[in-house]
Image (cartoon, rainbow, N blue to C red):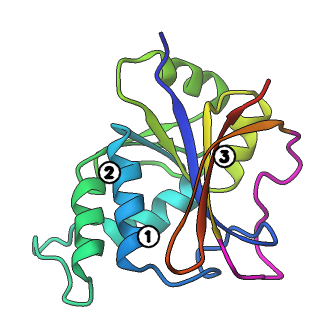
Amino acid sequence: MTQPLRYAINVTLDGCCSHEAGLPPDAESMAFWTDELRRSDTLLYGRVTYELMEGAWRRPESGEWPDCMDASEVAFAEVMDPMRKVVASGTLDAVDWNAELVRGDVVEAVRRLKEQRGRGISLGGVKLPATLAAQGLIDEYTFVVHPVIAGRGPRLLDGVDLKLELIERREFRSGAFVQRYRSAA
């Protein structure tokens, strides 16, 4: 039995996936994302997402989280920081932060990763998920849709043709809502 590959991302109403678009995180959304992380024991990112997440959520060398982080952000960071990370990149020479580097045929590498024992693999980013979705490797899609029109930025699964089945929907007090799907193939 293979472990599930779960793709989850924030997205605006017009399908943009820039981390700068959307509502600022609040305690409710951070609790949601922390629980999402707990569903998996491995994080899978491309270079851009890995570097973005490392810059935001890696424990500082001092061991202390910055004062600017609220309790919900610290809780998220405490879950993410020690997790195993797999980074698909043709440009990085090395990674750290509990990470291993995947080079070459990323589709085959992800197939092998899914065959390993575990609770699941949490996938983030924009380009890598589009590649894996086109190959039918993603088992579950979770979109936190923000009530914002960004008008620019990377697009959600651009160029990928998918049929999905809704399995969960819930709304946050902020007006953002979660839609969780599985492939309808």
Q: Nearer the viewer, mark 1 or mark 3?
A: 1
Residue furthest bottom in the image? 68
| Residue at the spot of label 3 | 128
Residue furthest top in the image? 1
Q: Residues in magenta? A: 146-161
Q: Which of 86 and 141 is in front in this view?
A: 141
Q: Could you tell me which residue is drawn at 19 percent across and 89 percent down? A: 67
Tell me if 132 is positioned left or right of 158 in this view.
Answer: left
**107 vs 173: above or below:** above
- Is residue 10 something one can see in this rendering? yes
Numbered tag placed on residue 29 in the rendering = 1
- The three-letter code of the residue at mark 2 reads Asp
Tell me if 77 is positioned left or right of 65 in this view.
Answer: right
Q: Earlier in the sequence, mark 1 or mark 3?
A: 1
Secondary structure of the residue carrying numbered label 3: helix
In reply to whether residue 41 is colored magenta, the answer given is no
